[in-house]
Amino acid sequence: MDKKTKKTFEEILKKLKQEKENILKGFEEQLSSNDYNNSETSTYPYHSADIGTDAAMLESNTINMNKVMEEIREIDEALIKMNDNTYGVCEICGEEISDKRLKAIPFVRSCIKCSDKTRKK
């Protein structure tokens, strides 16, 4: 990968990381706002079904937070690979990952061929 292309992907990764961190911050603010099970601020009587709704929303937000945190870890790993010149190299076969695939998923770890092989197993 030439220096210009590498620099472009590095900028994409840094921007993507910032976007993911902003999403994560929004989840954290929502969870800490104590909106769940807060019937005291409501003008409507509290219904027991609201407990289930609140629990489902909390679980959904927690799952989404975990996904975003995992993506941030993968982005960080890709940025480390930038520094040691292994970015864009398939971790399975050692071949170069296509720019097209890297543009679609900048933190991808394997080429399309190896990804298909591991998915079929």
Image (cartoon, rainbow, N blue to C red):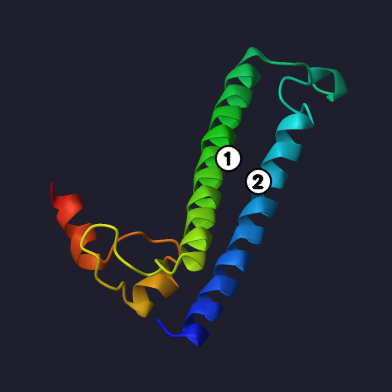
Locate the N terminus by quadrant: bottom left
Viewed as shown, does residue 104 lie left or right of 114? right
Judging by the rendered image, the residue that carries numbered circle 2 is 24
Judging by the rendered image, the residue that carries numbered circle 1 is 65
Residue drawn at 24 percent across, 70 percent down: 95
- N-terminal label among 1 and 2: 2
Disc 2 crowd rating (10 Å Cα; few below 14, some 14-19, many 20+) is: some
Q: Classify mark 2: helix, strand or loop.
A: helix
Residue drawn at 51 percent across, 35 percent down: 63
Residue 69 in picture, x, y percent from top left: 56, 44
The amino acid type found where label 2 is placed reads Leu
The amino acid type found where label 1 is placed reads Met
In this view, the residue farthest toward the front is 84
**Mark 1 and 2 residues: CB-CB less than 8 Å, in contact?**
yes
Q: Is residue 49 above or below residue 115?
A: above
Q: CA distance from mark 1 to mark 2?
A: 6 Å
